[in-house]
Image: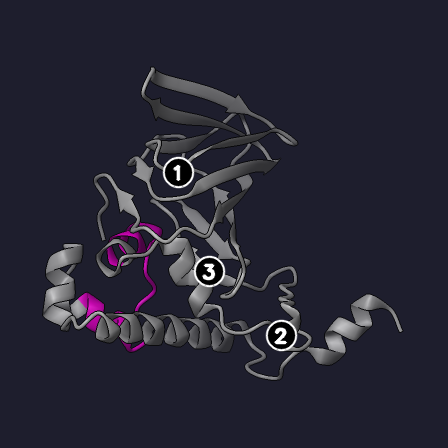
Amino acid sequence: MSAQSAGRKHRTTGPTSQADLDMAMRTELGATIRRLRKEGGLTLVELAVRSELSHPFLSQLERGLARPSMQSLHRIARALGTSQQALLALSAGPPATGRAEEGVHLVRSGEGMPVAAGSSGVARVLGASGFAVHPVEFTWASKCFEEYYDHAGDEFLYVVEGEIEVDLGTTQGQQLHRLGPGDSLCYAGSTPHRWRALGETDRVRVLMVQNVAGSPAKAHGEGE
């Protein structure tokens, strides 16, 4: 038996349509946010104040009725003392194949939790809880810089398709790095960072990996 067929044999059963998968993932994310909020002793109103997001939006999010953006997740994660990638990984559930103690998590093409990223991007969460890294695939079309992010831990970018320009606000001043397919970049997550699409193509694909860090995430100028 091949490794691929073995993986398929051990996959858990569940929703089969993309709509069902989307609903299941939004429900799990909402439940994770609610659990962390209650563990932190926060009411919905208090979380709304800390995250600077509306109470109705957070209520819908916890019930799985709203799909958050990466910006709103960053605000929520910061208010809960974590990062948005860690929050998404916790919501991805247990390993999708094999036994949980083996630490195996299989995500096939077209799978993974989809989250809006900025005004014209989509993030696909590839990780799960219990791992030391949080990988996310971004499909991005915006050619304009949006807000800066900074957070605990380190970050790694790898360009799969297209070209991007990464803007780093280092202590020595602004650094701009142009990356194409096969190029990668590592930097401290505490360095304010952002990136945009370049070139003639309508989209880019980028793999972003963050390592697990215990201190709260932080971002500049996010909106819901």
Question: Which SS does the magenta portion mostly show?
Answer: helix
Residue shown at the point (10%, 59%) measured from the top left: 49
**Residue placed most toward the observer, 117 or 75:** 75
Looking at the image, residue 123 sits to the left or right of residue 169; the answer is right
Give the residue at mark 2: 101
Q: Tell me residue 189's x, y (percent).
A: 39, 38
Q: Tell me residue 110's x, y (percent).
A: 60, 61
Determine whether 85 is above or below 56 in the image. Answer: above
Residue shown at the point (54%, 60%) measured from the top left: 131
Q: Tell me residue 210's x, y (percent).
A: 48, 46
> Does residue 203 show up?
no
Give the numbered dot on residue 114: 3
Residue shown at the point (74%, 72%) measured from the top left: 7
Q: CA distance from mark 2 to mark 1?
A: 29 Å
Q: CA distance from mark 1 to mark 3?
A: 22 Å
Which residues make up the magenta segment?
57-76
Looking at marks 2 and 3 on the same chain, the residue that comes earlier in the sequence is marked by: 2
- Three-letter amino acid code of the residue under disc 2: Glu
Q: Tell me residue 194's x, y (percent).
A: 37, 33
Q: Nearer the viewer, mark 1 or mark 3?
A: 1
Residue that protrudes farthest toward the bottom in the picture = 13
- Three-letter amino acid code of the residue under disc 3: Pro
Looking at the image, residue 39 sits to the left or right of residue 108; the answer is left
Q: CA distance from mark 2 to mark 3?
A: 26 Å
Give the numbered dot on residue 189: 1
Looking at marks 2 and 1 on the same chain, the residue that comes earlier in the sequence is marked by: 2
Are the residues flagged by discs 2 and 1 in contact, CB closer than 8 Å? no
- Three-letter amino acid code of the residue under disc 1: Gly
How many callouts does the rendering have? 3
